Amino acid sequence: MSTQAIQNAYPDFEPGLVKTIEEQAAVKHFKSGEVIIRTGQYIQNTMLLLNGKIKVYREDDEGNEFFMYYLMPGQACAISMICATKMETSKIMARVVEDSEVLMVPLNMMEKWMGEFKSWYEFVVTTYRNRFEEVLTVLDQVAFRSMDERLEFYLKRHAENNQSKTIHLSHQEIANELNSSREVISRLLKKMEQRGLLLLNRNSIELLKM
């Protein structure tokens, strides 16, 4: 881990904080497909993502998934922060979507930095607020929107998170994240293509007017 890598991912961190992270945090590398947080697990560290992408979701007793959000470089997992602080077991799952490099910040350091570094305090508060607002948005979509509206919202958010209008997800993967069936998602995507909103390719979806 280098100072430059931390600064690139977290440009708002003050120099003293960057130096302390370099000294105190551990770096871990995870491969795509690895589950790094499980429901019921005690969380001892806060995760700061340097590179890659991590999917955060809920899972029921039958293995059905409810997608919450993606953790992207320059972000932290707010739920892991809360669980670590309160010494509670995790209520979420986290799976690596793209090979990831993660900074593991020990609980005692996370609390200590809140009083020592203004940039860390602001980062934690902003992380809590942003994730809370994002989860509310997802809940609104589930509670008040039809499946075609939820699908359109999902595709837009995925494109924004990845800064690309080309989405490399199968119809089954999208169905899993929206708690639907592949047949329903395929039918809705075909209708959206007919409306000129997107283009369905063999291994990707290209957004056009969304």
Image: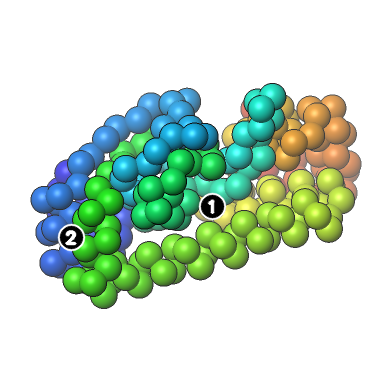
Which secondary structure, mark 2?
A: helix
On screen, residue 173 above or below 161: above
- Percent coordinates x, y for residue 57 in the rendering: 58, 40
Q: Position of residue 201 (x, y in %)?
A: 70, 31
Rendered-image quadrant of the C terminus? bottom right
Q: Horizontal placement of 178 versus 131: left or right?
A: right
Q: Which residue is mark 2?
A: 18
Query: Where's residue 143, x and y in %?
Result: 81, 55
Q: Residue at x 53, y 41 (%)?
A: 92
Q: Is residue 163 left or right of residue 204?
A: left
> Residue at 84% across / 47% down in the picture?
148
In the rendering, which numbered label is found on residue 161? 1
Figure quadrant of the N terminus: top left
Q: Residue at x 85, y 39 (%)?
A: 188
Which of 127/197 is in front? 127
Of the numbered discs 2 and 1, the one sitting upstream in the chain is 2
Element assignment for label 1 = helix
Locate residue 187 relative to residue 134 in the image: left or right: right
Identify the residue at horizontal 47%, vertical 51% (top origin): 79
